[in-house]
């Protein structure tokens, strides 16, 4: 009895300049350019790798992570829900591996580029990837090039 319940109401709207405006507790925060950022879905079963990949894009002015998945099946579901402009898949994941997920995602989002992040990049280079749904392969040993690949694929200026 006598407890006070406080509610915080957050309202979102787009202003004339298409900047997202957030009003919370009477304060206004502008998230300039957020509406123009390209969205990325990251799928990797290793939480440390997922976190590291998210950090790579955290401060990027034109790219943002819109979702994370812990396996291929979840990647397919989140791709359908979030409709990202780029997807990064680990090859070796439970429930559905990266190749299986890429094929399923291509049926839903045929024009969305998919980067396969793998330790086994040379094997794919030797055998080709033309029917896999994969747009580009990035070896895990060259993960530092991932942002450049992402920018190239979504044509970020």
Image: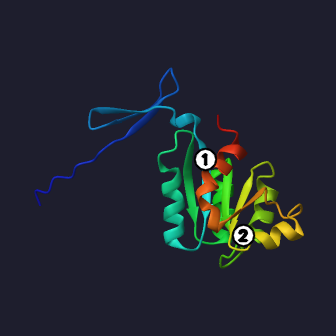
Is label 1 in a helix, a strand or a loop? strand
Q: Is 15 placed above or below 124 here?
A: above
Q: Position of residue 157 (x, y in %)?
A: 64, 34
**Quick one: label 2, few (<14), some, or many (20+) residues within 10 Å?**
many
Q: Is 147 placed above or below 123 here?
A: above
Q: Nearer the viewer, residue 97 or 1?
A: 97
On the question of residue 7 being in view, the answer is yes
Q: Position of residue 43 (x, y in %)?
A: 62, 65
Distance in Å between CA atoms under marks 1 and 2: 19 Å
What is the number of the mark on residue 39? 1
Q: Position of residue 140 (x, y in %)?
A: 64, 67
On the question of residue 84 being in view, the answer is no
Q: Nearer the viewer, residue 134 or 107?
A: 134
- According to the picture, the residue beneath numbered tag 2 turns out to be 98
**Residue lying farthest to the left in this orientation:** 2
Mark 2 or mark 1, which is nearer the start of the sequence?
A: 1
Q: Please name the residue shown 70% across and 71% down the image.
A: 91
Q: Position of residue 34 (x, y in %)?
A: 51, 37
């Amino acid at each position: 009895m006598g407890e006070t319940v406080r509610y915080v109401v957050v309202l979102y709207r787009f202003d004339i300049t298409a900047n997202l405006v957030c009003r919370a507790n009477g304060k206004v925060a502008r998230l300039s350019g957020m509406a123009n950022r390209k969205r990325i879905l990251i799928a990797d079963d290793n939480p440390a790798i997922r976190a590291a990949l998210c950090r790579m894009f955290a401060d990027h002015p034109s790219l943002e992570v819109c979702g994370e998945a812990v396996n291929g099946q979840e990647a397919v579901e989140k791709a359908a829900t979030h409709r990202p402009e780029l997807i990064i898949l680990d090859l070796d994941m439970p429930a559905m591996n990266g190749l299986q997920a890429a094929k399923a995602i291509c049926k839903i989002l045929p024009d969305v580029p998919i980067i396969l992040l793998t330790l086994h990049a040379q094997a794919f280079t030797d055998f080709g990837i033309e029917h896999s749904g994969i747009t580009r392969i990035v070896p895990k040993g060259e993960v530092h090039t991932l942002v450049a690949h992402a920018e190239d694929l979504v044509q970020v200026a």
